[in-house]
Amino acid sequence: SQQGEEDPQALSIQEGENATMNCSYKTSINNLQWYRQNSGRGLVHLILIRSNEREKHSGRLRVTLDTSKKSSSLLITASRAADTASYFCATLGEETSGSRLTFGEGTQLTVNP
Amino acid sequence: EAGVTQSPTHLIKTRGQQATLRCSPISGHTSVYWYQQALGLGLQFLLWYDEGEERNRGNFPPRFSGRQFPNYSSELNVNALELEDSALYLCASSSYGGGPQETQYFGPGTRLLVL
């Protein structure tokens, strides 16, 4: 079963607006990563935030992490039509025997030109 | 630098057959991961190989198996195919298996259709 949950499941905005996606998870983590997937193809890594970090920036992306609430958010500023894709959060658990990523169910973002 | 590559891009099989999917990691990466993305089930972890050994396995039946070769490339085999095995199979690689710095980089996937 999926550990993570993203909301909203779908988001439609106009070009130039900001898009915010949220992710919740259930267990302790080493890090949390955000990925983008275009039309059922491979995943593109966007950003990684470690469990001891609270905020991270990369270009137009801003990620926050609240380990007390077991949640993260991804903000895309000044969105473009090319940002249209599915966005997934994935957590790397603390368990010593793992190295698996546990994915959320994804947010489908549509940016209208 | 070349990314993770996977072959074939698409694969069509019939129920009961066997499928073999291949993955080449980023140069220098020793860990390879396999994930299944089936409609309605999301992305699920299948297998993790590191230095030629299977390190971890997801909640999949034994007919899902694989191996990692000395050059770190990997193969995923699915025996006795069932209709519900139809999915996008994604391979990822990383330079270090586990820890707060680990980033997994994904290939474009193999879309398997079982008829």
Image: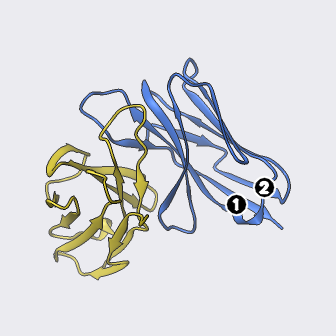
* Chain drawn yellow in the picture: B
Q: Chain of mark 2?
A: A
Q: Is residue A79 left or right of residue B113?
A: right
Disc 2 versus disc 1: distance between alpha carbons? 6 Å
Q: Is residue A12 left or right of residue B115?
A: right
Q: Chain of mark 1?
A: A
Between residue A111 and residue A11, name the one nearer to us.
A111
Q: Residue at horizontal 59%, vertical 37%?
A: A23
Q: Residue at horizontal 71%, vertical 65%?
A: A82
Q: Is residue A63 left or right of residue B75?
A: right
Q: Residue at horizontal 39%, vertical 42%?
A: A101
The numbered dot on residue A83 is 1
Q: Amino acid at mark 1?
A: Asp
- The image shows residue A38 at horizontal and vertical percentages of 58, 65
Between residue A16 and residue B52, name the one nearer to us.
B52
**Visible in this render: residue A11?**
yes
- The image shows residue A59 at horizontal and vertical percentages of 70, 47
Q: Do discs 2 and 1 belong to a common subunit? A: yes
* Chain drawn blue in the picture: A
